[in-house]
Amino acid sequence: MKKAVQLTGLSQTELVSFVETLGEPAYRGRQLFAALQHRRQRSFDEITDLPKDLRSRLSDIANAATLKIESRYLSDDGTRRYLMKTHDNLPVETVFIPEERRDTICFSSQSGCPLQCTFCLTAQLGLLRSLTAGEIVEQIQIALNDAYGTGVKPPRGTNLVAMGAGEPLLNLDELLKALRVMADPQGMHIVPNRVTVSTAGIVPRILDLAQTSDRPHLAISLAAPTDELRDELMPINKRWPIDELLSACKVFEKTLKPNERLTFEYVMLDGVNDSDEQARQLANLLNRHNIKSKVNLIPHNPADPLPYRPSPDETVERFKHILESKGVHTYVRRPRGRDIFAACGQLAARQVTLTSLVGADT
Ligand code: SAH
């Protein structure tokens, strides 16, 4: 593909400057922003409020969209998974999760992932590359357009979670850029307060995020209460062990708003990290660091090559009870879209044949 400017990653101000370099007036940039970010139009042909010759000049040097939908899967529970391809043919996955009062879109920050968490299927892809701001924005546009139609305002609010493929804090600049574009009230208007970024624990970037104004919420994937076990499950722990990670969380805590809490995610692996003793260790660890936080227990989503089983429901409940008895706020995350490989840790560009496959388009 020709080297073209990805317009979906540009802010309104940047789009104005861009059209000015073409000798066009500033308002054309604002029109373009409204078309791309407010109406979520994905081809210049659709943007009929711009003159035809401008559209044709734009299409010579820029892209209104770069991701293509390859497959779309619909779960029994209403969750949708999109498998897309970048212009250089790399997989990108996004999950749309309708809930009663809001929708949640789980997007990817990288194609593949360089971290080697043993319970996560994405690890098997390795890192293909980090995604651009435009590619991040487009995932949200594609999911909203598919759910509601191009140009239609979503009837419910949209929450975003950077919990798809990849380690978002290894792509922090592009991620924050995408979030700034999406926050614009004249665009999608999804504000950082509606966004949660999950990290395996890239300590220096947690400290950077703490210094970022208008930052999203933060979740930390813990998965183990001791370094010995965490080293095994999440090798990134060898670089930044638990105490360093929690010290960074303590710094981040100072930036929490009154009602905000840091989230610790804990994937529950049967017989590996779900014993009563480990629940007590986890509670003691979090209490020792005394961070305003809550714990999300995530029952493991199994996938063929992964050597784990999900903890039984009773074990999850007991684990939760022990944490709560020690004053730790604990929630259990209900798995969504397991049947279509859309649940946490299942994103590895799987092409599955299902009766619920609803076809592909762009
Ligand atoms: N790399 C980031 C973003 C991925 S978020 C991170 O590690 O936080 C995905 C969440 O799902 C993480 O909390 C991760 O620990 C969890 N997860 C990964 N594999 C899983 C699996 N097979 N079952 C359940 N949760 C899983």
Image: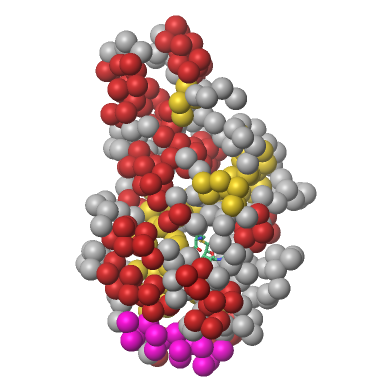
Is the C terminus in the top left, top right, bottom left or bottom right quadrant? top right
The colour scheme used to paint the residues is secondary structure
Decide if residue 109 is on the left or right side of residue 50: right
- The answer to whether residue 276 is above or below residue 297 is below
Q: Position of residue 17 (x, y in %)?
A: 30, 22
Q: Nearer the viewer, residue 72 or 211?
A: 211
Q: Quadrant of the N terminus?
A: top right
Question: Where's ligand 1: which quadrant?
Answer: bottom right
Question: In the image, what residue occupies the spot 49% across and 84% down?
Answer: 226
> Within the image, what quadrant is residue 84 found in?
top right
Asked if the stretch drawn in magenta spans residue 322, the answer is no
Q: Residue at x 54, y 83 (%)?
A: 228
Residue at image position (45%, 91%) is 280
Residues rendered magenta in the picture: 275-289
Q: Is residue 80 visible?
A: no
The relative height of residue 148 versus residue 27 in the rendered view (above or below) is below
Question: Can you give x and y, in whole percent of width and height, for residue 20 in the image?
Answer: 30, 16
Instruction: Residue at the far bottom: name it.
Output: 277
In this rendering, does residue 185 appear at all?
A: yes
- Residue at image x 48%, y 65%? 200
Residue 289, above or below 239? below
Residue 112: x %, y % from top left? 60, 52
Residue 310 left/right relative to 44: right
User: x and y percent of residue 26 in the render?
Assistant: 27, 18
In the picture, measured across the screen, residue 89 lies left or right of residue 49, that is: right
Q: Quadrant of residue 161?
A: bottom left
Q: Please tell me whether the stretch drawn in magenta is mainly helix, strand or loop.
A: helix
